[in-house]
Image (cartoon, rainbow, N blue to C red):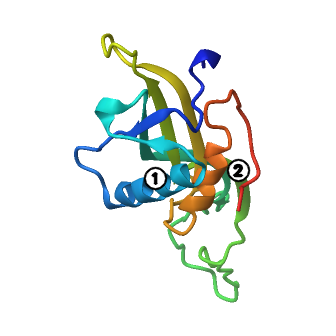
Amino acid sequence: RDPQYSPNPTSRIALANHLKPRPEEEALCVALTAELKQQGFHLVPQEEADYTLTYWIEDNWYLREIPKRTYDPGVSPVSTPMQPLPPGAAAIYSDPFNRSYRVTETLVDDSVPVQGIRLQLYYRPSGRTGRPQTVWEGYIDAGFKVSPEREPALLKTLLTFFGKDYTGRARLVE
């Protein structure tokens, strides 16, 4: 991040339009627009903007370890052909289905789908020549799903760090 390109409420910001937005990204756009206006940012059409802000709901995978049980039946009995028994001899029969199993528990990796909100801010040179350059990027993990009910708090928290250098965990702003 280049400190020369820190957005402030007087900066003219345009939200990038998605060509084929998913319904959850349309809802995110509404919530993001409301939060930026609430924080005093000046939203303008693309051709008047100093900055362009892109936004999307990102699908990720969270890797976790879960216990997995393995059942080991032990040594299976060898069956021998039945021999005729002499008179008066006793036969012993063991039930091969009534064995006690040895249980082994190991930790294995399991992938869980999660979502988050990603914002990227681009600066457009004043002459509009050249490529826009990325000046800030932010991401907030939303857990299993980004819900419309949680979007305002997630965006408010993410925008607390808008244009700043920060990496790490942050307490959710209500």
5 in relation to 8, above or below: above
Q: Nearer the viewer, mark 1 or mark 2?
A: 1
Image location (x, y in percent) of residue 54: 41, 38
Kind of residue at disc 2: Thr
The image quarter containing residue 168 is top right
- Which quadrant of the figure contains the C terminus? bottom right
The residue pinned by badge 1 equals 33
Q: Kindly identify the residue that appears in the image at 66 percent across and 50 percent down.
A: 157
Q: Name the residue type under label 1.
A: Thr
Measured as percent of width and height from the top left, residue 133 is found at 44, 18
Disc 1 and disc 2 in contact, CB within 8 angstroms: no
Which mark is drawn over residue 21? none
Q: Quadrant of residue 86?
A: bottom right
Task: Residue 113: tell me if it is visible.
Answer: no
| Quadrant (top left, top right, bottom left, bottom right) of the N terminus | top right
The residue beneath circle 2 is 106
Residue 106 makes an appearance in the image = yes
